[in-house]
Amino acid sequence: MERRVNIAEAAIAGGLLLIALYFGWHAFDYDMGTVRKPGPGAAPLASATLLGVLSAAILVTTMWAPKREDAPDLRAILLAIAGIAAWATLARPLGLLPATFATVLLVGLGERPFRPVRAAATFAVISLAGYLLFVSLLSTPIALIGPY
């Protein structure tokens, strides 16, 4: 099996690793606090550590992975990006449920063939989880339907 480094993946993973190191380094400028009462530097350091570990794993995997012949599905990637943008755009004026519906619909259209029953189930689960997490647990001021 032929092995060849995917330069694009390695460059992106290396760039993300550098970003993680940069933010991790600057996180130490803030107080870390304790485990029971984290300071303002704890979340940036945790995020930078997670990004660093994941990007290093991608970099290592890219270096030793066999050459792939299949190209990424550009349609699925673009629809996933459009779904995220739709949620960010629609959540404030329309509410949690319509924004989540638009996101699930767009991302679901990226899958071939489109499965409406699976999309409906995904919408129901994500909507319920979003309501329980953001509205009930965190008391975020987001309306289920309508502007907030």
Image (cartoon, helix red, strand yellow):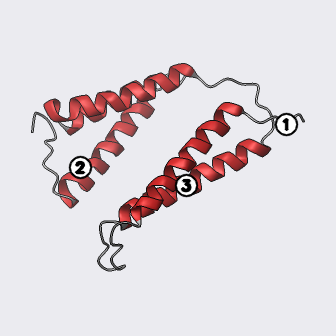
Residue at 36% over, 73% down = 32
Which image quadrant is residue 7 in? Answer: top right
Q: Which mark is residue 142?
A: none
Within 10 Å of disc 3 (Cα), the crowding (few <14, some 14-19, many 20+) is many
Label drawn at residue 3: 1
Residue 47: x, y in percent? 43, 57
Q: In the picture shown, does residue 143 fall above or below 129?
A: above
* Label 2: few (<14), some (14–19) or many (≥20) C-alpha neighbours in 10 Å: many
Residue topped by disc 2: 131
Secondary structure under tag 3 reads helix
N-terminal of the two: label 3 or label 1? 1
Residue at disc 2, secondary structure: helix
* Rendered image quadrant of residue 147: top left
The location of residue 23, given as percent across then percent down, is 44, 55
Q: Nearer the viewer, mark 3 or mark 1?
A: 3
Count of numbered circles in the view: 3
Q: Which part of the image, by quadrant, shows the C terminus? A: top left
Specify the amino acid type for callout 2. Tyr
Tell me how far mark 1 sits from mark 2, CA to CA: 46 Å
Residue 131 in percent (x, y) is at 23, 49
> How far is mark 2 from mark 3, CA to CA?
31 Å
Residue receiving disc 3: 52
* Nearer-N-terminus badge (2/3): 3
Q: In this orientation, which residue lies closer to the viewer: 148 or 30?
A: 30
Q: Amino acid at mark 3?
A: Gly
Place of residue 20 in the rendered image (x, y in percent of width and height, measured from the top left): 50, 53
Q: Earlier in the sequence, mark 1 or mark 2?
A: 1
Tell me the SS state at disc 1. loop
